[in-house]
Amino acid sequence: MRWSTFLPVGVLVAQGRAIPMLVPPSRELYPNNNNGPDNHYPNQDTSSSSSSSYLLHRAVPTGQVITHCTTPGIVALTFDDGPYIYTSQLLDTLASYSPPIRATFFVNGANWVSGIDDESTPYPSILRRMLSEGHQIASHTWSHLDLTTATTAQRVEQVTKLEDVLQRVVGIKPRYIRPPYATCENGCLEDLEGMGLHVVNFDVDTKDYENDSQAGIQVSVDKFNNELGSNPQTDSAIVLSHDVHRWTVERLVGEMVATLRARGFGTGTVGECLGDPQSGWYA
Ligand SMILES: *[C@@H]1O[C@H](CO)[C@@H](O)[C@H](O)[C@H]1NC(C)=O
Ligand SMILES: [Zn+2]
């Protein structure tokens, strides 16, 4: 495992990727931010000097699976597998709150729909709307391939094919990825690290795909309410759900936001909840 601060720069430069700018976190952004030397990454090097450890603690790592936010009080709602026919309605819902809720979309290039770059479909403009409304667009691979069983060549293709389309349609290349099926083993982490990617899973799984019906979605509402912490001074979460399911968009999202508000949590993108400025979200 390496920290992005200390990534072999040659690897990144060789691939033409931007080196993330490390800037001090904006504490104003996060009213409950008491983040500091007690950050949540278990394998941090605590022996380094205080000046470098400041960057060390704030830097988002590569080469390991991230499952927790580092900013107490901020919950990152994340939506996988889209875009799809419910995504536009979800964006309307997120925009309807005051302040609007910024979420993270782990998108595929060809999953529930193909041709996310086909301008005769709504999907290119939906992706641009995500960006313009402050959401974070992240990678979920091109075609939802299991990266644990994939070859290195397939992993690279799954990442770069989606990057190329997103670059063309939206003008960005995500630096965050969620591996399909939440699995990235057998050299997968090393391959994604070589591409400069942060690997992000979740610590609250709504399992919204299991009970996608008007009555059934209550199972996911209850699961979220039970698994979310209750103390915004200490707790945070990265929450998995999917914008490809009707009742996620029709009901679960509203219920999650109601719970977050009632318990005093704010919301933010995955990058925000990890203390990464927007300049670090994209290559
Ligand atoms: C929710 O899904 C699980 C897994 O398929 C199933 O066992 C359970 O009965 C479902 N519950 C409801 C209320 O639909
Ligand atoms: Zn998925």
Image (cartoon, rainbow, N blue to C red):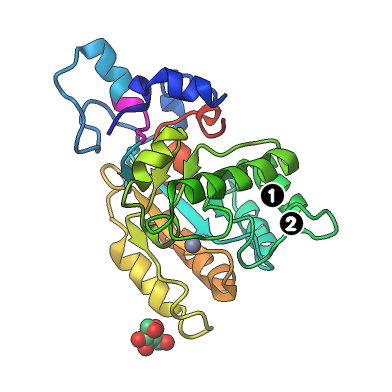
| Amino acid of disc 2 | Tyr
Does 80 sit left or right of 232 as displayed?
right
Residue in view at x 83 percent, y 53 percent: 119
Q: Camera-side residue: 63 or 94?
A: 63
Does the residue tagged 2 have its C-beta within 8 Å of any atom of ligand 2?
no
* Helix, strand or loop status at disc 1: helix
Q: Which residue is mark 2?
A: 123
| Spatial separation of the CA atoms under disc 1 and disc 2 | 6 Å
The quadrant the C terminus occupies is top right
Q: Pinpoint residue 212: horizontal percent, then vertical percent.
A: 51, 79
Other-residue count near label 2 (Cα within 10 Å), few / some / many at <14 / 14–19 / ≥20: many
Q: Is residue 83 above or below residue 233?
A: below
Q: Is residue 12 above or below residue 65?
A: above
Residue in view at x 36 percent, y 21 percent: 5
Based on the picture, tell me whether residue 137 belongs to the magenta stretch: no
Q: Is residue 22 visible?
A: no
Q: Is residue 241 above or below residue 32?
A: below
Does 241 sit left or right of 226 as displayed?
right
Residues in magenta, as a range: 57-62
Q: Which residue is mark 1?
A: 127
Quarter of the image where one finds residue 203: bottom left
The residue lying furthest to the right in this view is 120
Q: Pinpoint residue 276: horizontal percent, then vertical percent.
A: 44, 31
Residue in view at x 68 percent, y 64 percent: 89
Q: Pinpoint residue 274: horizontal percent, then vertical percent.
A: 39, 37
Q: Magenta part mainly helix, strand or loop?
A: loop
